[in-house]
């Protein structure tokens, strides 16, 4: 269970009180295993904002063991908090549990790495919090049974290739459900003073936020590109807390768009191109 909400601490190389405003540099799906040195340098140079408060990366940093190398490299490059969650590619070559375990232990040694899946919500500016969880395309939206789509995930993540394909759907649903339960617990731990909640997750939580070439996804792709369980948690939370503005940041589709789900719930989906990591934008908190 996550701890109660915390303010940024010295451990995060910040002051103990939240600043009056914060500026987060948001990137998603940077897939650094595909990026050569000059692409890496270009990505670093995009963070030239003089007053950044931190970075936020919404998954697919790399693949397999390179994830750990890239996280350390980013943490050593920036003297800022690095808020991140993991995407499906980050688990390639291993299992979901083993990858999360190693990443979590890395954050103990590199305090400016903040794995939001394993962290309590962080107060970034007065009454504005950041939280998140990995999420997964959880087969709850679209038509899994009749979809011809099968992602590389099934061949490259132990949780899938070590079991019979008849168990894949149940595994997808469980991963989505587990993420949603963790996220709900973190949202429920927010104080009554919260007025804005920023949520980082990898997979779009609604079909309306799952963009590809300017269109939202169809029934064949939706099972793997929408995390319906997280969508339900977010929709319920926004409905139950009309006084709170909920802003969600995700990636996974590599195609950008903004979806207004309700008066106080908006989802921003980032674009991405392999081998050309980029800064999606700077978010004022
Ligand atoms: Fe990606
Ligand atoms: Fe992804």
Image (cartoon, rainbow, N blue to C red):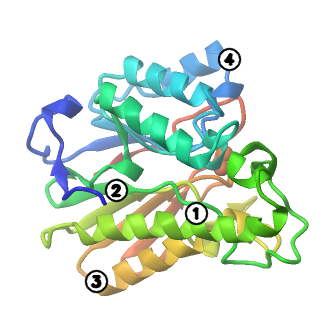
- Location of residue 156 (image quadrant): top right
| Residue bearing the label numbered 3 | 242
Mark 4–mark 1 Cα distance, whole angstroms, equals: 32 Å
Q: Element type at marker 3?
A: loop
- C-alpha gap between disc 1 and disc 3: 28 Å
Indicate the secondary structure of the residue bearing disc 2: strand
The residue that appears at 57% across and 30% down in the rendered structure is: 67
Residue furthest front as drawn: 163
Farthest top residue?
A: 37
Q: CA distance from mark 4 to mark 3?
A: 45 Å
Q: Earlier in the sequence, mark 1 or mark 3?
A: 1
Mark 2 surroundings: few (<14), some (14-19) or many (≥20) residues within 10 A? many
Seen at 49% across and 43% down, the residue is 100
User: Which numbered disc, 2 or 3, marks the residue that appears first in the sequence?
Assistant: 2
247 in relation to 107, above or below: below
Marks 1 and 3 in Cβ contact (< 8 Å): no
As drawn, 205 above or below 57 = below
Q: Is residue 83 above or below residue 204?
A: above
Q: Is residue 14 left or right of residue 79?
A: left
Residue 227, quarter of picture: bottom right
SS type, badge 4: loop
Q: Which of pointers 4 and 3 lies earlier in the amino acid sequence?
A: 4
Q: Are marks 2 and 3 in contact (CB under 8 Å)?
A: no
Q: Residue at x 27, y 36 (%)?
A: 53
Residue 27 in view (yes/no): no
Name the residue tied to disc 4.
36
Residue 46, image x and y in percent? 48, 27
Q: Earlier in the sequence, mark 4 or mark 1?
A: 4
Q: Position of residue 280 (x, y in %)?
A: 52, 43
Q: Which residue is mark 2?
A: 131
């Amino acid at each position: 269970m996550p701890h109660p909400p915390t303010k940024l601490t010295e451990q995060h190389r910040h002051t103990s009180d939240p600043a009056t405003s914060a500026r987060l540099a948001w990137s998603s799906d940077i897939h650094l295993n595909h990026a050569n040195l000059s692409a890496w340098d270009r990505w670093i140079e995009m963070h030239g904002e003089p007053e950044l408060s931190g970075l936020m990366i919404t998954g697919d940093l790399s693949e397999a063991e390179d994830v750990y190398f890239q996280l350390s490299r980013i943490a050593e490059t920036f003297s800022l908090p690095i808020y991140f969650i993991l995407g499906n590619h980050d688990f390639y070559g291993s299992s979901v549990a083993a990858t999360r375990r190693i990443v979590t232990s890395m954050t103990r040694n590199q305090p400016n790495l903040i794995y939001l899946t394993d962290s309590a919500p962080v107060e970034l500016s007065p009454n504005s919090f950041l939280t998140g969880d990995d999420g997964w395309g959880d087969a709850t939206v679209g038509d899994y049974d009749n979809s011809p789509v099968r992602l590389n995930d099934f061949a490259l993540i132990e949780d899938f290739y070590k079991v019979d394909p008849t168990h894949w759907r149940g595994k997808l649903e469980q991963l989505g459900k587990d993420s949603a339960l963790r996220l709900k617990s973190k949202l429920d731990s927010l104080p009554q003073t919260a007025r804005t909640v920023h949520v980082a997750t990898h997979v779009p939580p609604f079909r309306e936020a799952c963009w590809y070439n300017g269109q939202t996804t169809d029934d064949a792709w939706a099972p793997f590109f929408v995390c319906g369980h997280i969508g339900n948690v977010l929709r319920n939370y926004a409905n139950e807390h009309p006084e709170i503005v909920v802003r969600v940041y995700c990636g996974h589709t590599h195609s950008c768009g903004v979806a207004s789900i309700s008066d106080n719930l908006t989802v921003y989906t980032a674009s991405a191109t392999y081998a050309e990591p980029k800064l999606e934008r700077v978010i004022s908190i």
